[in-house]
Amino acid sequence: MIERKFVEQAMTNLRVKEYLREELKKAQISHVDIHRTPLNTHVIVYCAKPGFIIGRGGRKIEMLTEKLEKEFGLFKPYIDVKMVENPWIDAAIVARRIGEELERGKKYRPVAHRFLRKIMEAGAYGAEIRISGKLGGERARSEVFRIGYLKKCGEPANENVDHAKDYIVLKPGKIGIKVSIMVSLPEVSLLEKNIADLKVEESKEEHPDAVEKASAKSEEKEKEELQMKEKEEKNREEEKKRSMVAKSKRKASSKGGKSPRRGGKSPASKKGGKKPSVRKEKSSK
C-alpha cells in the first residue's frame, strides 16, 4: 500500500509538471519542484518571465491554484514563482526560445548559430543543439550544431551538463529540439587549470626577464615567417613571368616561316609547273 501511494504521488507530480509547462509556455519554464508537507503542497516554478504566471493582480496564479486542487487533488497547493538568474545557461529555457523562433518562421541554421554564440557569451564552457524533423524537405533529418567543450559520457556528463528537450508542431510536422550546455567544469580539469595558471604567475614573478625574452623571440619568429612568405610570393611571381615569356617566344616561333616538307613541291612548281627552257638557234652560214 505504501509503495502504491508513492507511485501515485510521482504520477501526479509528472502530470502537474506537464500541465504547467503546456499552460505557461510563454513564461519559459525551466523546471518545477513539488514538496509535500503536513500543512500544504509547495509548488516552486523556476522561469524566465514570472509576469506571465502571476498575471494582473495575481488572478492567474489564483486560477492555477484552484485547478491544481480540484483537478489534480493537491492538498492546499501554494505556488511560488522564482526567476532564473542566467536563462542563457538553462537548457530548458534555451530550447523553448529556439522553438519560439522556429514557430515565427525563421530558418533553423542562423537561429542555432546565434543561440550558441549567446550561450558562450553568458559563461558556458560548451554547448550542443540538435534539431530534428522535416527541415526544408520531404524526408526527416537531424542537424547538430556544436561549440566549445562538452562531455558526452561519465560522471561529468551527468553532473556538469544541463540537458533539455522540447518540440514544436509546424505545417510539415513535429520538430524536436535537444539542448546540452556545459555549465561547469569537472573538479579535475579545474585543478589542472589552476595549477597551470599558478605556474605561469610564478614564472613571471621569478624570471620577468625570461618572459620578456620569450616574447621578443616570438616576435622575431613572426617577422621571419612573414619575410619567408614574402620571398615565396616573389619567387612565384618571377616564375609566372618566366613562363609567360617562354610561352610568348614559342608562339612567335610557331607563327614564323616554316621550311617546306620533304618530298613537297617548290612554290614555283605549285604556281605554274616547269620553267620554260631557252634554246639558242645556230646561225645559218
Image (tube, rainbow, N blue to C red):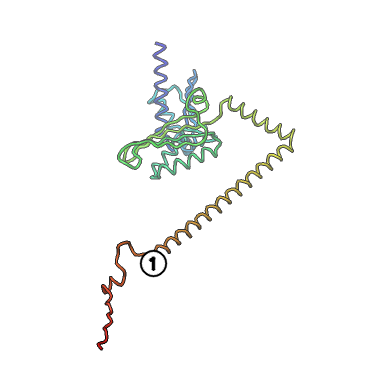
Image spot of residue 263 (x, y percent): 30, 62
x%, y% of residue 215? 68, 41
Which quadrant of the rendered structure holds the N terminus?
top left
Q: Position of residue 237 (x, y in %)?
A: 52, 55
Foreground residue, 168 or 9? Answer: 168
Left of 92 or right of it: where is 122?
A: right
Q: Which residue appears farthest toward the bottom when viewing the image?
A: 285
Residue 15 visible to the viewer? yes
Which residue is nearer to you in this view: 176 or 28? 176
Q: Is 65 located above or below residue 276 in the figure?
A: above
Which residue bears the numbered disc 1? 257
Displayed quadrant of residue 221? top right
Q: Residue 246 placed where, x, y %?
A: 47, 58
Amino acid at the residue labelled 1: Gly
| Res 64 → quadrant | top left
Left or right: residue 245 versus residue 138 is: right
**In this rendering, does residue 59 appear at all?**
no
Given residues 144 and 177, the one toward you in this image is: 144
Q: For the view shown, which residue lies furthest in the front direction?
A: 285
Q: In the picture shown, does residue 205 fall above or below 243?
A: above
